[in-house]
Image: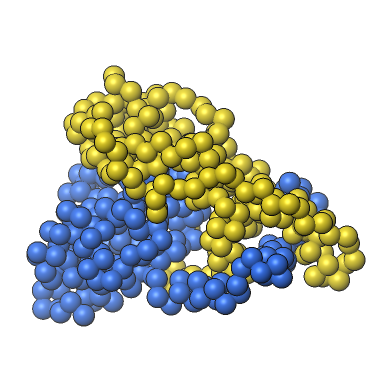
Chain colours: A yellow, B blue
Amino acid sequence: MDGIADMGGSQGWGRVRPPRPDEPVFAEAWQGRAFALTLLSIRVSGQNIDAFRHAQERLDRVAYLDDGYFGRWLNASELLLTDSAILAPGAIDARARNLRAEDVDEPPIPEPDKPDYAPAGPGSLRTVDSAPRFAVGERVRAKDMSPQGHTRLPGYARGHTGVVERIQPAAVLPDTNAEFLGENPQYVYTVRFESRELWGADAEPFVLTVEMFESYLETT
Amino acid sequence: MTTSGSEGRLPAALRTEALEQLLTERGLINPAAMDRLVSDYETNVGPLNGAKVVARAWTDPQYRQRLLEDGTAAIKELGFSGRQGEHIVVVENTPTTHNVVVCTLCSCYPWPVLGLPPSWYKDPAYRSRMVCEPRTVLSEMGLELAGDVQIIVRDSTSEVRWMVLPERPAGTGHLTEEELVPLVSREAMVGVGKVEAP
């Protein structure tokens, strides 16, 4: 999706924050709870980490940004849980209002409707029988595509040409796994791009690598 | 969705409490399991793990070689594995090459060795700008690199997780592995800082 989550190269965010050596893992107690709730909600909803990342992609700007990293985790968890009908839409807000002594009706618990899906194995790494389609050192182009659903192909790399630096182990394709359309395991390539290929002649000189699933790439 | 309107938006802390209550009262989650997760990431899974890996690599050439060839396996030798560490690739920073890690699409980070990501790593400014003006961003973070240093930005778009093996600082040849561990910062292992001699 071409949403708020695809941030590479977007402008207007200001200066970076300087590191603080004493930064706590969870600055506020709720953030730790939201972190743990998210890990458990992925399981309770019968979904997976790709669906969770896709849920973040689907958040609007307010839900994505305004309560920071763990706020977006909380909001994406709510999406997973309502998509699987573990919770009714609005259930969290209704309970939150009652927690602060408002008296609102809470929606009834729905009939759960988890995705019909089971992973082929633990984690995301898989073995595939075929040989890698691309070789180290080969020039490849990231497809210029703009899928409606989940993708891990960042917008700034689309249509650009780079060189395969490394072949990584085959892994589940997030694009389809996020929507329970199959794992489609395939090789992952670390592709190296020159900064001027991505950002034009005035770019700072540097190189950048992106992990590309095989189906994101084409020959040049 | 109900969270999106800015009018009457409820505090995240309150909504978190509500979600925990809703799932707990139906027996779908166990609050004790949540407590264990929180305390594990507050106390056990953090950048001290990565610092131990780096100090071992600086003092044991065979380990360093194994680490650069198969990061996941070499890191597991020291007991570190788990979530967000399925396939860790370690790259070495040298006087002429400087790797720096980012995740533009979310905030992917090698949890078993570095813990959960710090706020600057998750910040939109870092995520958006590191891939198009890394030298400027590094300078804002206090790291000035010489003009002839090749910068390699690693955007973590798959389950591959990158960890940087920083340069061992000059003047630390007399230090033991244990004495080197506290010198290694989280920032150096992401590539936004360097390790300084004490």
In this rendering, would A157 be left or right of A147? left
Front residue of B61/A200: it is B61
Q: Position of residue B192 (x, y in %)?
A: 34, 57
Q: Position of residue B48 (x, y in %)?
A: 33, 73
Question: Quick one: which residue is furthest to the top in this view?
Answer: A220
Front residue of B39/A209: it is B39
Name the quadrant containing residue B52.
Answer: bottom left
- Identify the residue shown where x is 53% and y is 45%: A117
Instruction: Tell me if I can see residue B155 in this picture.
Output: no
Number of marks: 0
In this rendering, would B42 be left or right of B53? right
- Identify the residue shown where x is 46% and y is 52%: B107
* Image: A199 above or below B128: above
Q: Position of residue A143 (x, y in %)?
A: 40, 24
Q: Quadrant of the C terminus of chain B?
A: bottom left
Front residue of A2/B36: it is B36
- Identify the residue shown where x is 49% and y is 55%: B122
Name the quadrant containing residue A139.
Answer: top left
- Identify the residue shown where x is 13% and y is 71%: B59
Instruction: Tell me if I can see residue A133 in this picture.
Output: yes
Q: Position of residue A169 (x, y in %)?
A: 28, 44
* Image: A8 above or below B83: above
Name the quadrant containing residue B174.
Answer: bottom left
In this rendering, would A78 be left or right of B155? right
